[in-house]
Image (tube, rainbow, N blue to C red):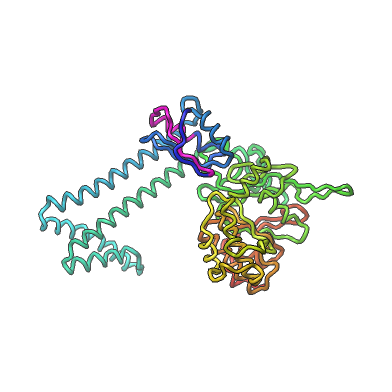
Amino acid sequence: MKFKILHEIRGRLRIHILTQYSQDDFDRLYCALNANRVIKRCKVYPATNDLMIEYMCGRKEALALLCQTNPNTVTVPEHALTSVAAARELKRQYISRLVGKVAARYFRRWFIPKYIRIAILAVKAARYIWKALKCLLKGKLEVSVLDATAITVSLIRRDFKTAGSVMFLLEIGEILEDWTHKKSISDLAGSMSLNVGKVWLKTEGQPVLVKSSEIRPNDEIIVGTGSMIPFDGIVSDGEALVNQAIVKFEDVTRIYTSVEHELKALDKVSFTLDEGKFVVILGPSGAGKSTLLNLLGGLDSPNEGTITVNGRDISTLSDNELADYRAATVGFVFQFYNLIPTLTVYENVQLVSQIAPDALDAKKMIGEVGLTDHLHNFPVELSGGEQQRVSIARALAKNPQILLCDEPTGALDSETGVMVLKLLLSMAKNYGKTIVIVTHNQSIAKMADVVIRVKNGKIRSISEQDNPMSADEVEW
């Protein structure tokens, strides 16, 4: 495929394709590129013959992939093309409905006599008022009651223009809601057409990835519920959306050797983590917790097994690729802060903008952790809790998908520790980050969505908590 680059930033390219492609060609390109493991996201613009990709590899590798991709030669499953075409047709139908609704409104305003418009308004208003009355009779106070109140008050005041505008906006909202619902159902139906090649089998309390043909009656299967379909493992056929685990460890072993002896820090560890979860890895000293964190953070590599993050096996990356991974994907919060003593608070946080491709505003992040008044203070002028908040702001300023915290409250008193944990929880919710905390503190585990217990290099249990405690409820 021949093209020219229109615009690029680190990790993202927009190109203009020099060969004129049809809509079918763009559908094939879209499916082929989105299915590639190094492509984070792809968008096509048939009207201008343009294409945009966000990639998780080197620039040269991304350009080489684009050059090699040709809609006439790529192999794309028929169901994937059908799904894309159906989504496009659904979009066309609802855009037509929206345009028709707007056109009808202006037609009535310009060509229909006022008394007829008022009669039409009254008929429409009756529907909303009746819906509100049914809610009230059931003892419920819902948004529809407020909508009907606004319409009724406007009609009583003979403010027909306002009543008409309210109902017009409600009708637009109903169309958009219906569109969103049908799109979700369409995506769901497409995603469920799959064959699962491997599943997670619970063996001695630890999940092991095995072939689905090896499953026997009464075997206990572990599934991780992502944002679409509750399946983890290897999907041999179907939509890529089915596997929502952001992190997957599969039979990971890490052995440290010296002249005198060999230490197996991790022994065939397997688990998955879903996006946006607050995860606590719990265990005594020497259990392998920090080794897990170092492997996930790209600071170390396993001797055996695979570590997959966003569909990419990071255990096979080169040193330069690992550096790019650490810069773009993970943020670190250390027990002893690791701030640069000769730099101010602002300079410590701003520093990450030089390495992170999508860094956030440093001052905004410092404000998020409540340290706006300390922008120009040096670390030595701050308390332990304030220094830890700076390290959290620095990690978040990178805008990572995963935030890794190694004993973030270990050097803090209980009151300051609670404040730091509340901050981490709020950041997870407000920014949608996956938070992984390594600790030996049993109390912190009560706050987690997922608790992974580690001992002697093995995972002893993985538990999900439907109603985790807040930081204020936890007793230290």
Residue at 16% of width from left, 51% of height from top? Answer: 108
Res. 431 visible in picture: yes
Question: Which residue in the rendered view is the most extreme toward the top?
Answer: 73
Question: Given the current orientation, which residue lies at the most extreme front position?
Answer: 342
The answer to whether 473 appears left or right of 288 in the picture is left
In the image, is 190 to the left or to the right of 91?
Answer: right
- Which of 205 and 366 lies nearest the eye of the viewer? 366
Residue at 63% in and 74% down: 415
Classify residue 382 by image quadrant: bottom right
Q: Position of residue 182 (x, y in %)?
A: 38, 46
Q: Is any part of residue 450 visible from this angle?
A: no
* Count of numbered badges drawn on the protein: 0
Taking 90 as reference, is 363 above or below it? below
> What span is in magenta?
10-31
- Measuring from the top left, give residue 431's x and y in whole percent: 52, 58
Q: Position of residue 69 (x, y in %)?
A: 51, 29
User: Which residue is more in the foreground, 371 or 415?
Assistant: 371
Q: Position of residue 392 (x, y in %)?
A: 60, 62
Q: Quadrant of the C terminus?
A: bottom right
User: On the picture, is 110 further left or further right than 18?
Assistant: left
